[in-house]
Image (spheres, rainbow, N blue to C red):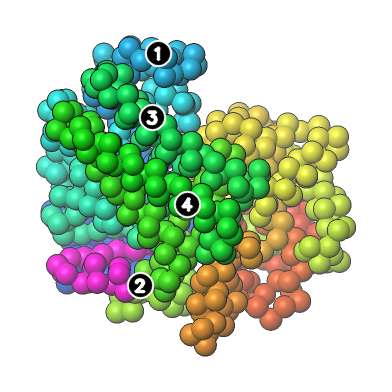
């Protein structure tokens, strides 16, 4: 028996040290596979069903190997859970002295230099931001880590954050007067010295693509890289292998130029004028687009004369700003940094307006105030394959949702992992007895006008039967808001709607309110772990196909067609199948959980491709009869009441 196998055995160290630990064959199999991957410096892809215990299955062999390990997770929340809960537990069980570190992106750390820069510039900042700035100053005098997430009084999107944190663009690096006291530098040093570093995907790929100061030194030292929630990687990696240019960047540059002019170079009025002009011309580009936020094809937009003219003006104004900054080079470190940023922005704008490029999608998106231009590669497979080829190290990719129709081909093709070892591990849950999947009879077509009335009717019945312990998940904000509005007059349960407050606050209110029903879209389809009687029903309105007018998807579809492929089968179905598995995965989170999954899309039954979706879902008891699903929910709650009465 290998060291790892024994660890997970009934009389092993984990059983001794962790209350309620039960050996699971799937968990042991995964841990042994990870152990072999570390030994052989190869790549491993594992789909581990919910409840397998995959976190321990990769952490234990990583710690036993005593190799430098980077663990990358999907979100900051998962990062913190892994670092503060899972790692200490497994370290204690193993008696390990391994050093561990949590590293976030630089925007999460207080920048002392920028905090001081905005000390006396009240004219640049509105009243609300000034109030927040005072709070940050008070907190800054006592913080040990400089992690902005520790400031509970600040909202996640607080206006003050860009003023007191740095970006890769505006960081002065070793030229900064506060370099030795920099919280980001301290966090990085700790990470360099650690045996296990916990990061998130955005940070990993930002570094990999940009060699962002502060993390680039970590990857070369790593012997093992583990990606948890690996199904998110293809989209995130594509984002970082591409380029962006935005009116917000122009606004930031203009603001930083203004600060330098007001504090250091008061004799250089032309700096402020040139910076302001860049900001205004970029803002005027936004005005040429519809008022409501949207996405679209940037190549097509560049055929419009008014857009071309505005881009020409923006190019000219950036050139002028560059020349003005050059006149003052060497007078101030911040100004020299801005000169580099402007130089980079000129290059990006040129590349983002070059419509002759092949193999990339040029697209734009607008917010209420800004426009962002994107250049995204249509495939990252070759780039990623080259990256992991040299030097040889161990790679583990794991998630509960990587397979489509019983195979890993889709993920392997996206990531260039053709030679990786693959392993599929079923969930230990007894799905046929714990859960029921219902696709109700007599559903209208998904886009039919009467579909909303049907959804409303089914939702009311499910909320009543589950006594509010229900997630209603939607594929669009429009349907979410429409059903939320209609439900208000039809049920007495508190209705919690995504967007009304932060995701964490909504979940906390849902757990506290024992009859509340939660309505969500994208954010609640994954990364949400509600156990026991607090969630007995999940409704999904329809198959989560990506919006057909998404410009990046359109470009990939076109590229697939040119290569003689079938984009619906090769791109759209696999993407939607993985998203559906994620949504369905919210229901059963524990061996004792019971519940009903209702999917209101008749294409699961009427279309041939419905079999692919059904084949990707857990093996729940299946029915077309909504009444059976309602009866199952009634029984769950009656059984609970009976147990409570007896006790």
Whether residue 395 is in magenta: the answer is yes
Front residue (pair 516, 426):
516
Q: From where the camera sits, is residue 294 visible? A: yes
> Which residue is found at the position 14% from the left and 44% from the top?
192
Horizontal side, residue 620 vs residue 635: left or right: left
Whether residue 125 is in magenta: the answer is no
Which numbered circle lies on residue 381? 2
Q: From where the camera sits, is residue 97 visible? A: no
Vertical order, 404 against 309 (above or below): below
Indicate which disc, 1 or 4, sits on the residue closer to the N terminus: 1
Q: Give the range drawn in magenta.
A: 381-398
How far from the left and from the top, in percent, is residue 445?
A: 81, 67
Horizontal side, residue 515 vs residue 317: left or right: right
Tell which residue pokes out farthest to the bottom in this image.
564
Element under label 4? helix
> How far apart are the alpha carbons under marks 3 and 2?
45 Å
Residue labelled with disc 4? 311
User: Crowdedness of circle 3 by 10 Å Cα count: few (<14), some, many (20+)?
Assistant: some
Q: Nearer the viewer, mark 1 or mark 2?
A: 1
Residue labelled with disc 1? 122
Horizontal side, residue 119 vs residue 596: left or right: left
How far from the left and from the top, in percent, is residue 389?
A: 21, 72
Element under label 3? helix
């Amino acid at each position: 028996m290998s060291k790892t196998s024994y660890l997970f055995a009934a009389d092993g160290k984990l059983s001794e040290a962790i209350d309620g630990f039960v050996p699971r064959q799937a968990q042991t199999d995964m841990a042994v596979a990870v152990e072999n991957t570390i030994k052989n410096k190869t790549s491993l892809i594992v789909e581990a069903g919910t409840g397998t215990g995959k976190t321990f299955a990769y952490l234990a062999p990583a710690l036993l190997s005593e190799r430098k390990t980077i663990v990358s997770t999907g979100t900051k929340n998962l990062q913190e859970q892994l670092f503060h809960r899972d790692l200490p537990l497994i370290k204690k069980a193993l008696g390990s002295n391994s050093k561990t570190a949590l590293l976030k992106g630089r925007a999460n750390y207080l920048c002392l230099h920028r905090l001081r820069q905005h000390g006396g510039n009240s004219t640049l900042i509105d009243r609300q931001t000034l109030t927040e700035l005072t709070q940050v100053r008070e907190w800054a005098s006592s913080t040990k880590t400089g992690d902005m997430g520790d400031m509970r009084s600040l909202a996640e999107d607080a206006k003050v954050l860009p003023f007191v944190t740095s970006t890769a663009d505006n960081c002065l690096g070793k030229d900064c007067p506060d370099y030795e006291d920099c919280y980001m530098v301290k966090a990085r040093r700790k990470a360099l010295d650690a045996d296990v570093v916990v990061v998130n995907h955005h940070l990993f790929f930002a570094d990999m693509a940009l060699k962002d100061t502060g993390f680039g030194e970590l990857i070369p030292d790593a012997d093992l890289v583990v990606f948890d929630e690996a199904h998110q990687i293809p989209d995130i990696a594509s984002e970082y292998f591409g380029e962006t240019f935005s009116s917000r960047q122009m606004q930031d540059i203009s603001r930083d130029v203004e600060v330098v002019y007001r504090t250091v170079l008061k004799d250089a009025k032309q700096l402020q004028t040139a910076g302001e002009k860049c900001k205004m011309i970029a803002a005027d580009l936004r005005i040429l687009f519809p008022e409501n936020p949207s996405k679209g094809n940037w190549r097509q937009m560049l055929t419009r004369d008014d857009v071309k003219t505005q881009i020409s003006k923006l190019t000219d104004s950036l050139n002028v700003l560059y020349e003005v900054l050059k006149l003052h080079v060497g007078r101030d470190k911040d100004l020299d940094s801005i000169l580099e940023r402007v130089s980079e922005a000129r290059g990006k704008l040129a590349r983002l307006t070059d419509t002759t490029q092949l193999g990339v999608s040029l697209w734009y998106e607008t917010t209420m105030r800004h426009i962002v231009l994107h250049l995204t590669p249509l495939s990252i497979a070759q780039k990623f394959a080259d990256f992991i080829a040299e030097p040889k190290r161990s790679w583990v990719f794991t998630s509960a949702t990587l397979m489509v129709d019983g195979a890993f081909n889709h993920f392997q093709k996206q990531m260039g992992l053709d030679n990786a070892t693959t392993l599929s591990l079923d969930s230990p849950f007894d799905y046929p007895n714990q859960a029921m999947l219902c696709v109700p009879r007599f559903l209208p077509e998904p886009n039919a006008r009467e579909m909303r009335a049907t959804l409303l009717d089914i939702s009311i019945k499910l909320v009543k039967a589950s006594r509010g312990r229900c997630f209603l998940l939607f594929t669009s904000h429009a349907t979410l808001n429409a059903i939320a509005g209609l439900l208000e007059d039809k049920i007495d349960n508190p209705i919690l709607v995504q967007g009304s407050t932060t995701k964490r606050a909504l979940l906390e209110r849902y757990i506290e309110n024992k009859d509340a029903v939660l309505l969500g879209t994208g954010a609640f389809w994954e990364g949400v772990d509600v156990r026991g009687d607090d969630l007995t029903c999940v409704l999904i309105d329809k198959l989560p196909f990506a919006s057909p007018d998404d410009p990046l998807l359109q470009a990939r579809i076109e590229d697939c067609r040119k290569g003689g492929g079938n984009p619906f089968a090769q791109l759209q179905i696999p993407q939607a199948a993985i998203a559906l598995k994620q949504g369905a995965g919210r229901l059963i989170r524990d061996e004792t959980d019971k519940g009903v999954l209702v999917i209101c899309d008749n294409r699961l039954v009427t279309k041939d491709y419905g079999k692919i979706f059904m084949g990707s879902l857990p093996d729940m008891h299946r029915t077309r009869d909504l009444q059976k699903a309602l009866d199952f929910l009634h029984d769950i709650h009656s059984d609970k009441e009976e147990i409570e009465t007896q006790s």
